[in-house]
Amino acid sequence: MADLYIVGIGPGAYKSMTMEAADALSKCPVIVGYTVYADLIREHFPDKEYITTAMRQEEVRCRMALDRAAEGIDTAVVCSGDSGVYGGSFRRSSFRCAADP
């Protein structure tokens, strides 16, 4: 399995994103997330494959991200704000996805 990152993009402006978040996104060929959040960063990472869903589709995004990582592709899952706070729904979903293949 490849690396799977949960990346908080901050308040939405690229200049407010941490360097660590930007580095993680730069490393990953695949970025998974809620469509609105992906659109906020797309112009800064145009060469990526974006996999997006509508709001409240956390488990669907989780499964897609885990599938891409299982294929050996480094994958980033984006959330707004701090990933330690707002990435929690992905972590909860990942446990459900892993338990229900």
Image (cartoon, grey):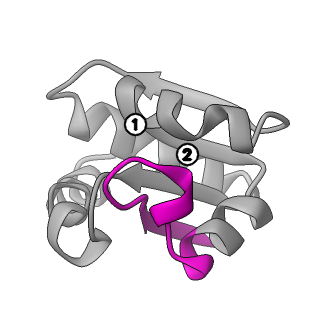
Q: Which residue is mark 1?
A: 37
Q: Nearer the viewer, residue 5 or 8?
A: 8
Image point 28% across, 18% down: which residue?
Answer: 54
Image x and y of residue 17, in percent: 49, 65
Residue 89 is inside the magenta segment = no
Q: Is residue 7 left or right of residue 69?
A: left
Q: Is residue 36 above or below residue 69?
A: above
Quick check: 80 left or right of 76? Answer: left
Q: Above or below — where is 73 with respect to 33?
A: below
Q: Quadrant of residue 10?
A: bottom left
- Compared to residue 32, the image places residue 77 above or below, namely below
Residue type at mark 1 is Tyr
Q: Nearer the viewer, residue 36 or 58?
A: 36
Residue 98 screen position, x and y as percent: 31, 59
Q: Position of residue 65 (x, y in %)?
A: 50, 47
Front in this rendered view, residue 58 or 47? 47
Density class for disc 2 (Cα within 10 Å; few <14, some 14-19, many ≥20) is some
Q: Disc 2 marks which residue?
A: 67
From which residue to which does the magenta span run? 1-21
Q: Residue at x 18, y 61 (%)?
A: 86
Residue 21 location (% of width, % of height): 55, 71
Q: Is residue 2 visible?
A: no
- Give the mark toward the camera: 2 or 1: 1
- Magenta residue check for 20: yes
For the question of whether residue 100 can be seen, the reply is yes
Residue type, numbered disc 2: Asp
Q: Earlier in the sequence, mark 2 or mark 1?
A: 1
Regarding mark 2 in the picture, which secondary structure is present there? helix
- What whole-number distance in Å separates the C-alpha atoms at marks 2 and 1? 20 Å
Location of the N terminus (image quadrant) = bottom right
